Image (cartoon, rainbow, N blue to C red):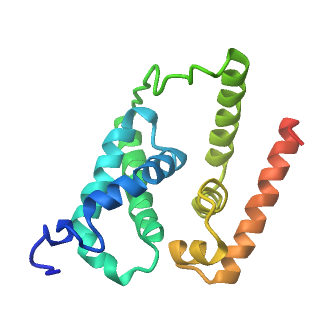
Amino acid sequence: MSKDDPGAADAPGSPCAFDDVYDQHGPFVWRCLRNLGVPVASLEDATQDVFLVVHRRLPTLEQWSNIRAWLFGIIRNVASNHRRSIRRKGTVVEVLAAELAHPATGPLEHAENAEAAAFIASFLERLNDRQRDVFILGFIEDMSGPELATALSIPVNTAYTRLRSARAMFRQALRRQGGL
């Protein structure tokens, strides 16, 4: 794979074909962007921005042992840029229906799911960037301590410490909410 040929990463049989990365990790990118505070109305643009960077930098992926860690670095930067852009413009466009409710879900389940999602979003807004990253990757994306350490470029013991702290903060938030 030549670094001079940007399409080389897309070659069939390539260990890091763009289509494979997109297909396998698109939902991960979407969830992380949303959990990092990108408004629903901007998710498609932000996701496209992430995959533009991925396409451009895919030849450098060989040096990474964990693609999700590599992706999260890109996701974090794109989310930060989108939030900053929205703050600068001073307006937020809200989409009325981001997704349709599952037909098997009744009104009670839909309301409970919406309430849980709002609680998580509110909890994430109160965290600083380091805490939010650990919570998203450790709880929502279920990354292990070593994967967290790689994704966040921190020592493994620090990853476990931050994970325990995030877990304690979440339990405390649940208690205040009346969920535990």
- Residue 115: x and y in percent read 70, 29
Horizontal arrangement in the rendering, residue 94 relative to residue 120 (left or right):
left
The residue depicted at 77 percent of the width and 59 percent of the height is 167
12 or 92, which lies in front? Answer: 12
In the rendered view, tell whether residue 84 sits above or below residue 24.
above
- Residue 114: x and y in percent read 65, 28
The residue depicted at 62 percent of the width and 21 percent of the height is 104
**Which residue sits furthest front?**
13
Count of numbered labels shown in the rendering: 0
140 or 20, which lies in front? Answer: 20
Horizontal arrangement in the rendering, residue 91 relative to residue 152 (left or right):
left
- Residue 30: x and y in percent read 44, 47
In the rendered view, tell whether residue 9 sits above or below residue 114.
below
The residue depicted at 72 percent of the width and 74 percent of the height is 160
The residue depicted at 29 percent of the width and 51 percent of the height is 49
Horizontal arrangement in the rendering, residue 120 relative to residue 70 (left or right):
right
- Residue 45: x and y in percent read 31, 42
| Quarter of the figure with residue 180 | top right
